[in-house]
Image (cartoon, rainbow, N blue to C red):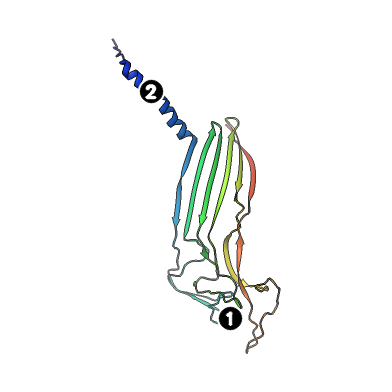
């Protein structure tokens, strides 16, 4: 025989009073689903010495200003194009049972330009323009999903919501334009051996502008 134990009235009353609080906690957990933030520190450096023959665009080349010489890389110099720090964070909010809104942030620090492997490039405003590195940047993205049926999900995304102008990488090289934007094919006279120095600059790889996208996903059984 199974015996049942009656719950005292005070205990039943306390249990009922706890129900609204439990419902609020469950609703809060369902409404906001923050993803863990991620921070990466990557100190990428050369582990041995090297001589880079194509030092065009680097002010420290061994041939002189505006000429195509070589540069020396030593162990400990930073690898180009690789930012030291990257930070990512995201937040997803369920506004109802079938609709979710998401916001994420991606931020990176600056990085040396390709051609500045030795980190010794310095702009002088005459033969060399630009800092020889790409600056850091931060981009905010937004997304939304709606599950219309168990198999069909609609989604929308806005990349780079603030339409931030940024550079994802940089490279050193010769240019035919001066600091004012005017084109000059031979900006400097020939030197004693008859070589014509060129003006050099830092070229940037433009980051993606604001981008809207719509789509759907269908899950087949």
Asked if the residues shown at circle 2 and circle 1 are in contact, with their CB atoms under 8 angstroms apart, the answer is no
181 or 67: nearer the viewer: 181
- How far is the residue under mark 2 from the one under mark 1? 81 Å
Disc assigned to residue 124: none
Residue 219 can be seen, yes or no: no
Q: Tell me the residue at 57%/77% (across/down).
A: 124
**Residue 28 left/right relative to 211:** left
The number of callouts visible is 2
Q: Assign a secondary structure to mark 1.
A: loop
Q: Position of residue 211 (x, y in %)?
A: 64, 49
For this orientation, the residue located farthest to the bottom is 192
The residue that label 2 is drawn on is 17
Query: To which quarter of the image does residue 41 belong?
Result: bottom left
The C terminus appears in which quarter of the rendering?
top right
For this orientation, the residue located farthest to the top is 1
**Residue 11 left/right relative to 31:** left
Q: Is residue 132 above or below residue 127?
A: above
The residue that label 1 is drawn on is 65
Sequence-wise, which precedes: disc 2 or disc 1?
A: 2
Q: Position of residue 172 (x, y in %)?
A: 58, 70
Query: To which quarter of the image does residue 26 belong?
Result: top left
Q: Is residue 45 above or below residue 220?
A: below
169 or 33: nearer the viewer: 33
Q: Position of residue 171 (x, y in %)?
A: 58, 67
**Neighbour class for label 1 at 10 Å: few (<14), some, many (≥20)?**
many
**Neighbour class for label 2 at 10 Å: few (<14), some, many (≥20)?**
few
Q: Tell me the residue at 51%/57% (across/down).
A: 108
**Residue 147 left/right relative to 181:** left
Q: Tell me the residue at 32%/15% (across/down).
A: 9
Q: Assign a secondary structure to mark 2.
A: helix
Q: Position of residue 165 (x, y in %)?
A: 61, 57
């Amino acid at each position: 025989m199974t015996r049942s134990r009656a719950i005292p009235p005070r205990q039943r009353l306390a249990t009922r009073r706890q129900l609204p609080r439990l419902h609020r906690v469950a609703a809060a957990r369902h409404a906001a689903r923050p993803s863990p933030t991620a921070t990466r520190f990557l100190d990428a450096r050369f582990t041995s010495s090297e001589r880079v023959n194509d030092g065009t665009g680097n002010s420290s080349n061994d041939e002189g200003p505006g000429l195509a010489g070589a540069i020396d890389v030593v162990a400990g110099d930073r690898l180009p194009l690789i930012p030291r720090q990257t930070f990512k964070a995201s937040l997803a909010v369920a506004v109802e049972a079938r609709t979710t809104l998401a916001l994420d942030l991606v931020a990176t620090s600056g990085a040396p330009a390709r051609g500045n492997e030795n980190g010794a490039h310095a702009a002088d405003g005459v033969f060399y323009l630009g800092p020889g590195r790409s600056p850091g940047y931060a981009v905010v993205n937004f997304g939304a999903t709606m599950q219309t049926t168990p198999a069909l999900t609609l989604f929308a995304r806005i990349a780079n919501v603030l339409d931030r102008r940024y550079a994802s990488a940089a490279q050193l090289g010769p240019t035919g334009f001066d600091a004012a934007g005017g084109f000059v094919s031979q900006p400097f006279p020939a030197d004693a051996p008859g070589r014509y120095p060129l003006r050099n600059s830092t070229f940037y790889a433009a980051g993606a502008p604001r981008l809207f996208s719509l789509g759907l996903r269908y899950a087949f059984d």
